[in-house]
Image (spheres, rainbow, N blue to C red):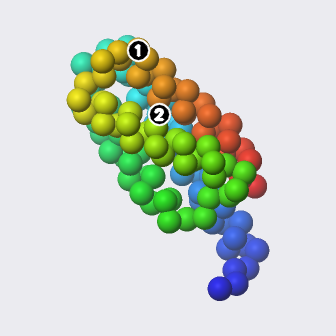
């Protein structure tokens, strides 16, 4: 199936926006967890669910080769981080730092989508 350049550009920008939304959520979640995981737990779970929905909506899309490897690593790590959140992180500061680190990585890598 051939796509016009405009459609191709739109699809790439849509992917970039979703990755940036995921990155923003990860940073928010990390900040809330670092501040007070227990008090912010409902909000953290809400944003984890939203992030998972974003991820599910882009799994089927073509991830550019420039970010494919790191995105696969992120998906694997996110799965573990999400499970850990549901069980209660053993070290909430370390867990929060991992979320924020992935948020920063995805923000920077999204700039490679043009």
Pick the front one: 65 or 8: 65
Q: Residue at x 71, y 66 (%)?
A: 9
Badge 1: how crowded within 10 Å, few (<14), some, or many (20+)?
some
Question: Where is residue 41 shown, x and y percent of the image?
Answer: 26, 27
Which image quarter: residue 38? top left
Question: Where is residue 59 shown, x and y percent of the image?
Answer: 49, 59
Q: Are marks 1 and 2 in contact (CB under 8 Å)?
A: no
Indicate whether 32 appears above or below 71. above
Which image quarter: residue 82? top left
Pick the quarter of the image with the N terminus: bottom right
Residue 43, can we see it? no
Which image quarter: residue 4? bottom right
Q: Secondary structure at mark 1?
A: helix
- Residue 108: which disc? none
The residue at which mark 1 appears reads as 93
- Residue 26: which disc? 2
Q: Residue at x 63, y 48 (%)?
A: 69
Residue 74, can we see it? yes
Badge 2: how crowded within 10 Å, few (<14), some, or many (20+)?
many
């Amino acid at each position: 199936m051939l796509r016009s350049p405009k459609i191709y550009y739109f699809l790439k920008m849509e992917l970039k926006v979703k990755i940036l939304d995921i990155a923003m959520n990860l940073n928010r979640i990390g900040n809330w967890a670092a501040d007070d995981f227990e008090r912010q737990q409902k909000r953290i779970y809400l944003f984890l669910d939203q992030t998972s929905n974003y991820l599910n909506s882009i799994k089927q899309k073509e991830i550019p080769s420039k970010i494919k490897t790191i995105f696969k690593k992120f998906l694997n790590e996110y799965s573990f981080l999400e499970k850990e959140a549901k069980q209660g992180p053993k070290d909430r500061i370390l867990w929060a730092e991992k979320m924020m680190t992935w948020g920063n990585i995805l923000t920077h890598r999204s700039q490679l989508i043009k």
